[in-house]
Amino acid sequence: MQTQLDKDITRVTDAVTAPGQMFALKTVERRGVEVPAFVNAPPTLAHYFAHFCNQNKDELFLVDGDNRLTFGQVYAAAAKVADGLATKHGVKKGDRVGIAARNSANWAICYMGVVMAGGCATLLNGWWTGEELAYGIDLCECSLVLADAPRAARLEGQAHGATVHVFEHGDPAQTLAELMGEGGTAMAMLGQLGEDDLATILYTSGSTGHPKGAYSDHLGVVSGVMNYICQTAMILQLLTERNEAPSVKPSALVTVPLFHVTGEIPVFLQSIAIGRKLVLMPKWDALEALRLLDEEKVTYFVGVPLMSYEMATHPERDKFDLSQCKSFAAGGAPRPPEHVTKIKEAFPEGYPLLGYGLTETNAVGAGNLNENYMAKPGSTGMASRPLVDMAILDDAGKSVPDGSVGEVSIRSVCNFLGYWKNEEATQAAYTEDAYFRTGDLGYLDEDGYLYIVDR
């Protein structure tokens, strides 16, 4: 039976996606199938950055240790990086530029600069060994890699085909100065980039064999971001109706790596449109996280499931004012049901949330939130409206009866285009009617809630 929250989500989502509204829908063709997309989405990430960083230019965006940068300052730095990439390194539209670094303001500026130069932001796993980094560089044919000193050191002595530019963390005006130019590459590229151009490559986990490079065009990445923005707008409307909305500027504590799709899309990229401050934590520590939640008046937390539980059970939790944090989100694995209850008890003014998405789906998939999550703590929730079409399929790609276990499969405009230079794997990942096969086994209950039973 539908809950009141289910009904409210349907009501508000229907309203904001109606013709003429902010998130109005159209149809586009992906892999020969018509799927919904947003009418008003920017055509590329470069256009997205230009519009929303200007709209929010005076608001604080990145808190990275002692560095506090506004959206306008971050965009200006990224524009200089874009020009330096084009004029000093010869980066052209579609060139893969690797980024290998820990979370920092400079990671974000480099990502934006690559995209604004027309390049493909290729997100190398910052936890990889030197051999693994070299493999990822050559797999996707990176011509240039922007690396911080520890990752650059790992690459020393490893054979690969890229030029490595080393940067430090800290004030970007100083630490990225050698990379920066002074010309108008970013502005000129706005007239050259389109939604079909290559935007990003992210790497699969490689749990079996070598990782694969999942590549996406601007339409896919922007659509994934906009789907999250639509959901955030919907939730904010519901919290406002209930007089439960945060009373301070939206902000998030970033504990997940930005090279991972969760850190990239719902956390980093979404924040640019909603004017959300990001507080960067280079290394996880539950006590430090509690301090930052209080000091920075953080409204949104996301991490692996155990992180929220560590904060909820920390012996010094009561020393901190966490009343502004309304959401304690997790992804990557299910929470034990008892953790869901414990988190709600520890943070009574907030709710635990759980999301389900993959690298190949640009992070969109399903979500379970607030009282619905309390009622069904074992579920990853319902398909994320308005773009996601979710099905449970058998080995032949046919839908199984409701309640039966099959392969969780997702169809949306957000899905990746393929695995770089691996057409065989790309074809195996998709059904004939454009569903991406996640490799996860699950079922949908009578209310359309997804339960993962094996991965």
Image (cartoon, rainbow, N blue to C red):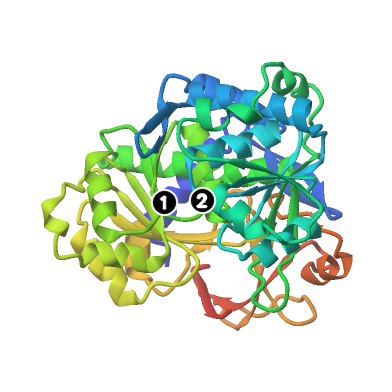
Residue 173, given in percent of the width and then of the height, sits at 52, 25
- Residues packed near mark 1 inside 10 Å, few (<14), some (14 to 19) or many (20 plus): some
Amino acid marked by disc 1: Pro
- Which residue is farthest top? 183
The vertical placement of 131 against 106, above or below, is below
User: Between 290 and 162, which is closer to the camera in this rendering?
Assistant: 162
User: Which percent across, then down, holds residue 336?
Assistant: 36, 76
In what element is the residue under mark 2? loop
Image quadrant in which the N terminus is located? bottom left
Q: CA distance from mark 2 to mark 1?
A: 7 Å
Provide residue 37's location: percent of width, then percent of height. Answer: 69, 42
Image quarter in which the C terminus is found: bottom right
Viewer-side residue, 101 vs 42: 101
- Nearer the N terminus, badge 2 or badge 1? 2
Q: Is residue 42 visible?
A: no
* Left or right, 455 with reference to 434: left
Secondary structure type for disc 1 = loop
Q: Quadrant of residue 166?
A: top right
Residue to which mark 1 is pinned:
282
Q: Residue at x 69, y 30 (%)?
A: 116
Q: Residue at x 79, y 21 (%)?
A: 191
Q: Is residue 66 depicted above or below 6 in this figure?
A: above
x 57%, y 25%: residue: 77
Q: Position of residue 87 (x, y in %)?
A: 77, 25
- What amino acid does circle 2 point to? Arg
**Contact (Cβ within 8 Å) of mark 2 with mark 1:** yes
Residue at 25% over, 34% down: 247
Q: Residue furthest front?
A: 157
Above or below — where is 127 with respect to 216? below
Q: Give the left or right position of residue 49, taking residue 66 as reference.
A: right
